[in-house]
Image (cartoon, rainbow, N blue to C red):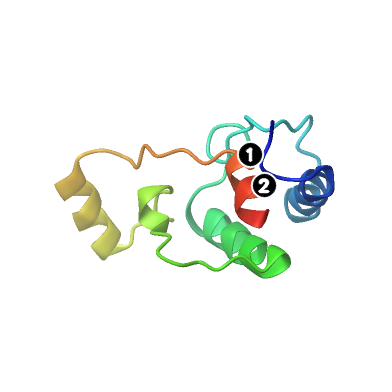
Amino acid sequence: MTSYSKETWTGLCQFVREQLGDVGSLSPISNLQRDLQLDGDDAFEFMEAYAEWFGVSKGDFAFEDYFGAEGLNPISLVRALLRRSKPTTLITLEMLARAAG
């Protein structure tokens, strides 16, 4: 059983297609980074639009835990070197649907 309604899922799919265009088939396990190729500025804009569209509070969402930086931002470069790996926490469409409720 899911923790979101069919209407929420339909709205999320509509939102994704409006933001990203033709992305093919979407499923709850579709991953924003791997399947939808979101990262950097594009991911930031997508998540900002998602929060506004669904009225979801950003709370303590730490963007850098989920997505890489765009271009060569010196601060991001230092963080990446200290971390020595790209963020590995993945976000799926199901996670977004649950947050949208």
Q: Residue at x 46, y 38 (%)?
A: 90
Question: Is 96 placed above or below 51 here?
Answer: above
Q: Which of 74/6 is in front? A: 6
Question: Which residue type does callout 1 highlight?
Answer: Glu
Q: Residues within 10 Å of mark 1 (few under 14, many from 20)?
A: some
Q: Residues within 10 Å of mark 2 (few under 14, many from 20)?
A: many
| Disc number for residue 86 | none
| Disc number for residue 94 | 1
Q: Is residue 71 visible?
A: no
Q: Residue 23: horizontal and vertical position, in percent?
A: 75, 37
Q: Is residue 45 visible?
A: yes
Q: Residue 36: horizontal and vertical position, in percent?
A: 63, 38
Q: Secondary structure at mark 2?
A: helix
Q: Residue at x 56, y 45 (%)?
A: 38
Q: Quadrant of the N terminus?
A: top right
Question: Is 25 placed above or below 76 here?
Answer: above
Contact between marks 1 and 2 (CB within 8 A): the answer is yes
Q: Which of 69/52 is in front? A: 52
Q: Residue at x 57, y 56 (%)?
A: 42
| Left or right placement of residue 68 versus residue 34 in this view | left
Question: Which residue type does callout 2 highlight?
Answer: Ala
Instruction: Find disc 2 in the rendering and name its residue.
Output: 97
**Residue 61, quarter of the rendered image:** bottom left
Q: Residue at x 55, y 54 (%)?
A: 43
Q: Secondary structure at mark 1?
A: helix
| Left or right placement of residue 61 versus residue 81 in this view | right
